Image: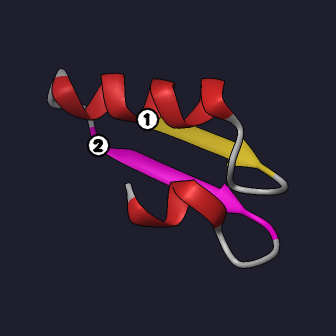
Amino acid sequence: MLIGITTCGDAANVCAALQAARSRGLRTLGLAGEIGGTMKTL
């Protein structure tokens, strides 16, 4: 499992890590402040 944490939800490195983890079959959990940013759609 990969847990991605970002305050804005738009951190490119966190979003890339979440995408890479999913492509390898890992479960993912994203924690973001505000409205979720880009990470919300992953």
Q: Quadrant of the C terminus?
A: bottom left
- Mark 2 is on which residue type? Arg
- The picture places residue 38, in percent across and down from the top left corner, at 56, 56
**In this picture, is 7 found above or below 25?**
below
Crowding at mark 1 (Cα within 10 Å: few <14, some 14-19, many 20+): many
Mark 1 or mark 2: name the one nearer the start of the chain.
1
Based on the displayed image, in which of its 4 quarters is residue 37 positioned? bottom right
Q: Residue at horizontal 63%, vertical 24%?
A: 13
Any magenta on residue 7? Answer: no
Q: Residue at horizontal 18%, vertical 27%?
A: 23
**In this picture, is 1 found above or below 8?**
above
Any magenta on residue 29? Answer: yes
Q: Quadrant of the N terminus?
A: top left
In this picture, which residue range is highlighted in magenta? 27-33
- The picture places residue 7, in percent across and down from the top left corner, at 84, 55
Q: Main secondary structure of the magenta part?
A: strand
Q: Nearer the viewer, mark 1 or mark 2?
A: 1
Crowding at mark 2 (Cα within 10 Å: few <14, some 14-19, many 20+): few
Q: CA distance from mark 1 to mark 2?
A: 9 Å
- Mark 1 is on which residue type? Leu
In this figure, which residue is indicated by the disc labeled 2?
27
Q: How is the image coloured?
A: secondary structure
Which element carries disc 1, helix, strand or loop? helix
Q: Residue at horizontal 33%, vertical 22%?
A: 20
Q: Is residue 39 left or right of residue 25?
A: right
In this figure, which residue is indicated by the disc labeled 1?
18
Q: Residue at horizontal 65%, vertical 69%?
A: 36
Circles 1 and 2: CB atoms closer than 8 Å:
no
Q: Nearer the viewer, residue 42 or 4?
A: 42
Q: Is residue 24 left or right of residue 21?
A: left
As drawn, the residue found furthest toward the bottom would be: 35
